[in-house]
Image (cartoon, rainbow, N blue to C red):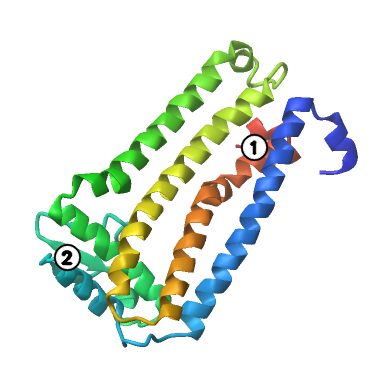
């Protein structure tokens, strides 16, 4: 967007645009750092001091948590939803099961822990992993509806964009984005807090544990802005194509 277009924007739309750009810059910095850490700890450094694979570490966590389940390698599953309780099957992707990188251990450990929580029916932890995030997302969509309905003038003139209150529009979109982000943050932090003590009992070196801790930290930061990146096209349309973004969606 050039300087002339920015000056022509209404004040509230300009505020939405500026906030979007700031979040985008922060998101990109965190995302690039996260990707570099993934490359180093997955593609360059491919081993660990205890020679764990993702599968053997998973078994170790199951043993520590006194849980007996079956393993199945599968490409198709959603993370944190990879346990079929009825048949007691814990799914792992082939590369997670066989690789030995620190990144693999982090990924396998969090999935293994979630399975043990489900199998042991630990209500307090289930709340942090599933129910609190679900409620957060529902609240986000409810707020979105409220922000859209509260300004009847915006809804009335939505197609022509004349008289649209862009502050309410920005709040409506933000409520959905950040509800998903906060939900993911709650889930990651809940798992992170419980997985690290289990990993400390594996015999991994302090450096390896610090690396896993750092990955979890970056992952939690990334969760805050990940859904902003997912729906960034909406913000781009709000800013760069302010007067005709509805037509192109």
Displayed quadrant of residue 168: top right
Q: Relative to 71, is 127 on the left or the right?
A: right
Q: Residue at left 26%, top 62%?
A: 113
Q: Which mark is residue 65?
A: 2
- Pinpoint residue 54: horizontal percent, then vertical percent: 30, 76
Q: What is the secondary structure assignment of the residue under circle 1?
A: helix
- Pinpoint residue 92: horizontal percent, then vertical percent: 27, 69
Q: Is residue 243 visible?
A: no
- Pinpoint residue 169: horizontal percent, then vertical percent: 61, 26
Q: Residue at left 84%, top 36%?
A: 6
What is the number of callouts on the image? 2
Q: Which mark is residue 248?
A: 1
- Distance of mark 2 from mark 1, alpha carbons? 52 Å
In this view, 169 is above or below 123: above
Displayed quadrant of residue 56: bottom left
Q: Relative to 109, is 18 on the left or the right?
A: right
Q: Residue at left 30%, top 56%?
A: 80
Q: Relative to 108, is 118 on the left or the right?
A: left
Q: Is residue 153 visible?
A: yes
Image quadrant in which the C terminus is located: top right
Q: Nearer the viewer, mark 2 or mark 1?
A: 2
Q: Nearer the viewer, residue 148 or 210?
A: 210
Pointer 2 or 1: first along the chain: 2
Q: Nearer the viewer, residue 188 or 237?
A: 188
| Residues packed near mark 2 inside 10 Å, few (<14), some (14 to 19) or many (20 plus) | some
Q: Relative to 22, is 249 on the left or the right?
A: left
Q: What is the secondary structure assignment of the residue under circle 2?
A: loop
Displayed quadrant of residue 98: bottom left
- Pinpoint residue 13: horizontal percent, then vertical percent: 73, 29
Q: Residue at left 64%, top 21%?
A: 159
Q: Which mark is residue 37?
A: none
| Residues packed near mark 1 inside 10 Å, few (<14), some (14 to 19) or many (20 plus) | few
């Amino acid at each position: 967007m050039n300087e002339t277009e920015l000056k022509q924007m209404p004040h509230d739309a300009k505020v939405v645009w500026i906030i979007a750009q700031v979040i985008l810059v922060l998101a990109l910095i965190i995302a690039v750092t996260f990707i570099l850490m993934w490359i180093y700890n997955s593609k360059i450094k491919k081993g660990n001091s205890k020679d764990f694979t993702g599968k053997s570490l998973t078994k170790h966590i199951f043993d520590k948590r006194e849980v007996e389940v079956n393993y199945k390698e599968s490409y198709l599953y959603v993370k944190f939803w990879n346990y079929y309780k009825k048949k007691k099957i814990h799914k792992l992707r082939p590369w997670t099961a066989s690789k030995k990188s620190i990144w693999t251990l982090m990924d396998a450990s969090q999935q293994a822990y979630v399975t043990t929580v489900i199998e042991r029916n630990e209500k307090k932890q289930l709340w942090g992993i599933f129910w609190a995030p679900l409620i957060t997302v529902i609240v986000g969509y409810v707020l979105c509806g409220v922000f859209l309905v509260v300004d009847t003038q915006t809804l009335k003139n939505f197609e022509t964009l004349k008289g649209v209150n862009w502050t309410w529009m920005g709040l409506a979109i933000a409520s959905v984005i950040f509800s998903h982000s906060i939900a993911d943050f709650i889930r990651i932090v809940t798992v992170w807090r419980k997985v690290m003590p289990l990993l400390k009992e594996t015999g991994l070196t302090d450096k390896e544990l610090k690396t896993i801790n750092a990955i979890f930290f970056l992952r939690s930061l990334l969760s805050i802005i990940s859904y902003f990146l997912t729906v960034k096209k909406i913000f781009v349309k709000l800013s760069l194509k302010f007067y005709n973004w509805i037509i192109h969606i």
